[in-house]
Image: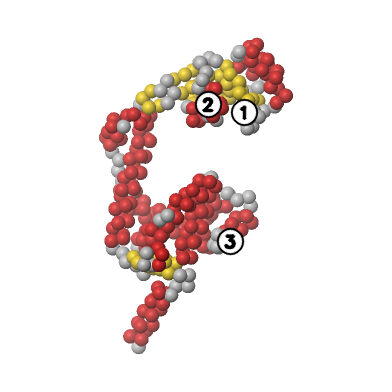
Amino acid sequence: MIRIIFLILCLGFLCSVVFPEDGLVAIVNKEVVTQKDLDDFVNFMNMQFSVQYSEEEAERKINEMLSDLIKRLIEDRLIMQAANKEDIVIDPMRIKARVEQIKRRYPSEADFKAEIEAQGMSLGELELKIKEQLLMAQIIDRKIKSKVVVKPQEVTDYYNAHAQEFIMPERRLVRAIIINDSSLVDSVKTSISEYRDLEAISREHSLEINELGWVISRQLKSGIADIVFDSEAGSLRSYLDPESGSFYILEVESVKPPEQAALAYVQDEIYRLLFEKKMQEEMVKWLDELRAGAYIEIRGEYGGS
């Protein structure tokens, strides 16, 4: 009887591996990866990216991911299997909060639910995917992130070796009056030629002065940047934005030429760069270890067999 039960269990497992409902793509240890898993993975990542990025950027990232989709999904399975061996508990409120964050991207709850259905998912499946994502993040924190250390001397050494990467571009201290009422523009233009003074123009027309602070060229719209960075300190210039129709009066108060950024100013940036580099290196090593100790078989077009 024991042998019969054992054989039935084995046959049940083999049937689930060889004849999965959605078409077998890969086997990762004792788990199967089906075409539906791949489709669900893409759909879920699409919803995730929609929270973090613009529509165009999200589409670009999805297209980049598709080139090594099966590899990404297998890595996720290996990480999930590692996480399931640990005593990691995910607070359900974190899952709910993540769902709410995604939901805010949609005009209404009905639109949100319609998008889930359009992606071939249910709300329960979305919550499960989020839980898995949080579990993977926790195990990565535990196995890798918590062990990565960047020493202060490493930050200093990187700064000294890459000094040319930390040249601060030319900066300009800028103030502006922005006029959205086209009926005021002609009278304001007269005031510019008469006063050449931003405060006087502001008082005469009851207009607010916007303190833009120290800016670099890429922080400004191209037309405004062209004027600001072609002006001398103390000059007053005007600009009509062809897109918005807004009329700008721009004053450059002061100019700072390009200069070497002090270590104190860029040390956080260097720390993050070195930390991410070490994280990536350790992540690659850990995934290699997980693969080495796993049974992985890729089927059909994905495995070239």
Cα distance in 3D space between marks 3 and 1: 42 Å
The residue under label 1 is which amino acid type?
Asp
Q: Are marks 2 and 3 in contact (CB under 8 Å)?
A: no
Q: Residue at x 54, y 29 (%)?
A: 222
Q: Is residue 161 above or below residue 136?
A: above
Q: Is residue 228 above or below residue 39?
A: above
Whole-percent x and y of residue 276?
35, 44
Pick whichever, 40 or 245, lies toward us.
245
Residue drawn at x 50%, y 15% is: 233
Q: Is residue 23 visible?
A: yes
Q: Secondary structure at mark 1?
A: loop
Report the residue marked by disc 2.
225
The residue lying furthest to the right in this view is: 183
Q: Quadrant of the C terminus?
A: bottom left
CA separation in Å, label 1 and label 2 = 12 Å
Q: Earlier in the sequence, mark 2 or mark 3?
A: 3
Label 2 sits on a secondary structure element that is helix
State the image coordinates of residue 77 (x, y, percent, origin top left).
39, 61
Quick one: 281 or 5, which is closer to the camera?
Answer: 281
Q: What colour scheme has been applied to the protein in the rendered image?
A: secondary structure
Q: Amino acid at mark 2?
A: Ala
Q: Earlier in the sequence, mark 3 or mark 1?
A: 3
Q: Within the image, what quadrant is residue 185 found in? A: top right
Name the mark on residue 117: 3
